[in-house]
Amino acid sequence: MLFKFLELEQKNNNIKNAEYYHTNNIVSSNENYIIEIESIPVGIYISDFLDIELDDLFFKFLKKQITISQNRGDVAGKLEIDKLQPCYKKYMKKVKEFNETGSRTMKNKDINYEFCNPLRSSIVTPSKPLYIKNEKDYIKYFKDIIKKIHKQLKSSFKLPKNYDKGFFDCFYNQLIINHRLRSASHFDKKNKFPYSSLMCFSANKELKESIISFVDYDVGFPMKSNKSLLIFDSCNIRHSNNEMKEELLKDRFSVVFYRK
């Protein structure tokens, strides 16, 4: 597999966390890249990482995993009352403060939990009910993909010598499935390992690719549906999604593999 080196250059912009960003500076979807900052590798992009057919049952399975989450802060963008579910709207009169970016409410004496705009997503771990209930399907659809990503991860980055094994004896111990999500600018600060792996899936033949952008470097990576892989330091590189047509976004799933 041949790679080109892509040196990222810091750009000045006024984009804050929880705001949306769109770049027109998109790398070639026909090339593979080793991504560097000051000559230090911070990621890799593989255009055609997967070469398998995904049937309708795969996408039905993904859709079945989705729940509504209201705890993902900056990813969900600045909080908008009109986007909230009725059960959360009724608490807005009791909300007195927001976090620094305005994406999440803050606890107070009248309300003892925080929330943000609703997202269609689910966090999956090997020990939690969502995985246990659907283990056979996760093995069927994700085992080979995760093992292939793990092999690429080991060949590209230095993994800790000792770690508790996650999915299928591999390094990552969590994944998140997103549906219909255009993520706002954010870091993944709470991860215990910086290099997350991202793939995008769609049954819609019209959705050839979607773009994940590195906000502070004004560069985008075309994620071919059901094919491309992006591994990058998501803890220290702000990232978001380019704007896309709603009729295509509604058919898009993104899956992020990471370590907590």
Image (cartoon, helix red, strand yellow):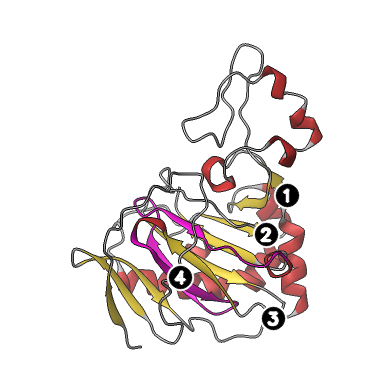
Q: Earlier in the sequence, mark 4 or mark 1?
A: 4
> Can residue 170 be seen from the camera position used here?
no
Q: CA distance from mark 1 to mark 3?
A: 25 Å
**Residues marked 3 and 2 touching at CB (< 8 Å):** no
- Which residue is the site of mark 3? 206
Report the disc number at residue 67. Answer: 1
Q: Earlier in the sequence, mark 1 or mark 3?
A: 1
Q: Earlier in the sequence, mark 3 or mark 4?
A: 4
Q: Is residue 229 magenta?
A: yes
Mark 2 is on which residue type? His
Mark 4 is on which residue type? Asn
Q: Residues within 10 Å of mark 3 (few under 14, many from 20)?
A: few
> In percent of the image, x 65 and y 41: which residue is there?
117
Tell which tag, 1 or 2, sits nearer the viewer: 2
- Which residue is the site of mark 2? 179
**For residue 57, side relative to residue 11 (left or right):** right
**Residues marked 1 and 3 touching at CB (< 8 Å):** no
Mark 3 is on which residue type? Glu
Q: Which residues are magenta?
A: 217-246
Q: CA distance from mark 2 to mark 4?
A: 24 Å
